[in-house]
Image (cartoon, rainbow, N blue to C red):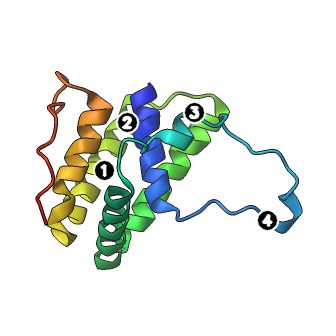
Amino acid sequence: MKNILLVLTLGAALAVPAFAQSADSTNAPPSGPPPGGFHHDHMSFLTDAEKAELKKAHDAAIAADPSLATEEQSIHEAMQSAHESGTPPSDADKAQWHAFHDKLDAAMIAADPAVAPIIAKIKAHHHGPGASGGTPPPPPPAN
């Protein structure tokens, strides 16, 4: 379950540049899990350079195929709604989310092949050694 939430959060972080508060809610306490929860450190294992490279590739993939942004937002909203209502995602929801991320990963690699090792690193981190596809990624190419 935690891995699924990590994947969901990754998608949300890449889909939405920032979660802005409205002017009338500036004094409202933050919602969601406390700092240190999965919403705050799901990508902490990446370097700042890797995060920037990943965002650049994500933006390029979305620019090349804007339907990816629409699909990502739609799936994210459905998963977030289910999460907020306390309903765990169904196997079909999980399969749809994973299929979308496979498609997005491929589009990002097509836009910038240098992100392939970063994506592999993310998958290895989420699935761990011994899981399917869970072997550690190769080191990034030297520039």
Q: Residue furthest front?
A: 143
Q: Is residue 82 left or right of residue 52?
A: right
Q: Is residue 117 left or right of residue 77?
A: left
Give the camera-side residue of 117 and 47. 47
Q: Nearer the viewer, mark 1 or mark 4?
A: 4
Q: Amino acid at mark 3?
A: Gly
- Which residue is tagged 1? 101
- Which residue is tagged 4? 22
List x then y, in percent, for residue 48. 39, 57
The earlier-in-sequence mark between 2 and 3 is 3
What is the CA distance from the residue labelled 2 to the residue labelled 3?
Answer: 21 Å
Q: Residue furthest bottom?
A: 63
Dot 2 and dot 3 residues touching (CB under 8 Å): no
- Which residue is tagged 3? 37
Estimate how packed mark 3 is, as few (under 14), some (14 to 19) or many (20 or more) residues with alpha carbons within 10 Å.
Answer: few
From the image, which quarter does the N terminus lie in?
top left
What is the CA distance from the residue labelled 2 to the residue labelled 1?
Answer: 11 Å
The earlier-in-sequence mark between 4 and 3 is 4
The earlier-in-sequence mark between 1 and 4 is 4
Dot 3 and dot 1 residues touching (CB under 8 Å): no
The earlier-in-sequence mark between 4 and 2 is 4
The earlier-in-sequence mark between 3 and 1 is 3
Dot 2 and dot 1 residues touching (CB under 8 Å): no
At 37% from the left and 41% from the top, the residue drawn is 45
List x then y, in percent, for residue 56. 34, 70
- Which residue is tagged 2? 94
At 47% from the left and 35% from the top, the residue drawn is 5
Q: Is residue 69 left or right of residue 25?
A: left
